[in-house]
């Protein structure tokens, strides 16, 4: 227990240092980091092939390079709360083991960079990424998106929402000029990239038209906006609903001043170099799993998620790829 508390404290210290470092960046370095003026759409790394033009890496042509490990390694989205969130996946991991006939080991990652490195290096086989990180995972680490969280009718989708404290004078996007906007982390679509692209469309750039900082988590942004500590923050609609359902915040504590069009929430998939048979079993495990009555139900009750539904990277992530292109920022790079 003491060790767990120490690790949590250490992670928080690291997070605070990242926030402080981000806050120290000047206007020039920020504009260079995101390259707002020059679009740079990202295609598959040259080490991958895409014979069927689905924008996702093919399995290696040489069957000898396809892996079927003795045990599958599973993780969910990287972050400071990854270890706590992994508890929700115990029933799915048992289901995945039954379907594939392989034991399933779980692993957590504090940073997206570490998660991508593990996937690209063959040390992570089945995993999930938040919306904004999916294009990077696909193009640099060989992630094959299979499904996202949805409903019995096959529908899915979340929105980026700008929230402010209930008593805030901010009423519309134009009121954000001169304010301090708290983003979640640079790789998040709802918490950062979609918001940056939207503000750019309204001719607003960070440090020139508004100040910025990072909270490193939707939960943190939501709670601190509700308490009045943060002025305004972009967050994912499903995370906001989850906070309301958990009682972390109350409806009378905040207001939504803007909602985007819908896009896929966190997306699950596998490494492109799994054997054909194993890849199909992993896909089957996701699509056959019903969240109701399992350890995942509580987490997704707020969004009324009931099951995993198929997702098309080429079609369903078109908006997110356009956002990436508009701000021209490859979130992370995986070493060859």
Image (spheres, grey):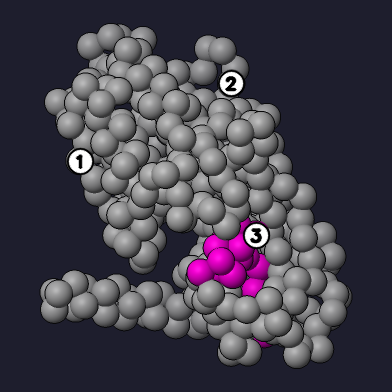
- Residue range highlighted in magenta: 231-246
Distance between mark 1 and mark 3 Cα atoms = 31 Å
Q: Nearer the viewer, mark 2 or mark 3?
A: 3
Residue 280 percent coordinates (x, y): 39, 17
Residue 147 percent coordinates (x, y): 52, 33
Label 2 Cα neighbours within 10 Å, binned few <14 / some 14-19 / many ≥20: few
Residue at coordinates 21% horizontally, 22% vertically from top-left? 101
Is the Cβ of the residue at disc 1 closer than 8 Å to that at disc 2? no
Q: Earlier in the sequence, mark 1 or mark 3?
A: 1
Q: Residue furthest front?
A: 293
Residue picked out by circle 1: 105
- In the depicted structure, whether residue 86 falls above or below residue 41: below
Residue picked out by circle 3: 237
Residue at coordinates 65% horizontally, 74% vertically from top-left? 233
Residue at coordinates 31% horizontally, 80% vertically from top-left? 13
Residue at coordinates 59% horizontally, 17% vertically from top-left? 53
Is the Cβ of the residue at disc 1 closer than 8 Å to that at disc 3? no
Residue picked out by circle 2: 54
Is 37 part of what is drawn in magenta?
no
Residue 100 percent coordinates (x, y): 27, 22
């Amino acid at each position: 227990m003491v060790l767990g508390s120490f690790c949590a404290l250490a992670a928080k210290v690291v997070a605070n240092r990242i926030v402080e470092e981000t806050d120290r960046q000047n206007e020039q370095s920020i504009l260079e980091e995101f390259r707002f003026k020059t679009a740079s759409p990202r295609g598959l790394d040259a080490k991958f092939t895409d014979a069927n033009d689905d924008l996702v890496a093919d399995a290696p042509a040489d069957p000898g390079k396809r892996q079927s490990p003795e045990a599958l390694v599973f993780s969910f989205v990287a972050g400071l709360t990854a270890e706590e969130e992994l508890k929700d996946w115990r029933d799915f991991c048992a289901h995945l083991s039954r379907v594939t006939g392989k034991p399933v080991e779980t692993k957590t990652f504090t940073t997206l960079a570490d998660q991508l490195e593990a996937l690209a290096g063959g040390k992570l086989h089945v995993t999930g990424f938040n919306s904004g990180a999916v294009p990077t995972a696909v193009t640099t680490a060989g992630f094959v998106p299979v499904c996202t969280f949805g409903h019995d009718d096959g529908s899915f989708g979340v929105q980026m929402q700008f929230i402010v404290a209930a008593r805030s004078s901010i009423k519309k996007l134009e009121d954000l000029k001169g304010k301090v906007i708290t983003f979640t982390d640079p790789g998040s679509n709802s918490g950062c990239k979609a918001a940056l692209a939207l503000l750019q469309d309204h001719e607003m750039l960070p440090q020139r038209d508004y100040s910025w900082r990072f909270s490193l988590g939707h939960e943190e942004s939501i709670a601190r906006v509700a308490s009045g500590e943060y002025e305004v923050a972009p967050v994912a609609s499903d995370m906001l609903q989850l906070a309301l359902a958990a009682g972390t915040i109350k409806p009378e504590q905040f207001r939504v001043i803007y909602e985007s069009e819908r896009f896929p929430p966190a997306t699950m998939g596998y490494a492109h170099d799994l054997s054909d048979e194993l890849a199909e079993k992993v896909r089957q495990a996701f699509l056959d799993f019903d969240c109701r009555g399992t350890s995942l139900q509580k987490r997704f009750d707020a969004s009324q998620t009931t099951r995993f539904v198929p997702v098309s990277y080429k079609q369903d992530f078109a908006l997110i790829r356009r956002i990436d292109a508009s701000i021209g920022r490859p979130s992370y790079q995986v070493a060859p």
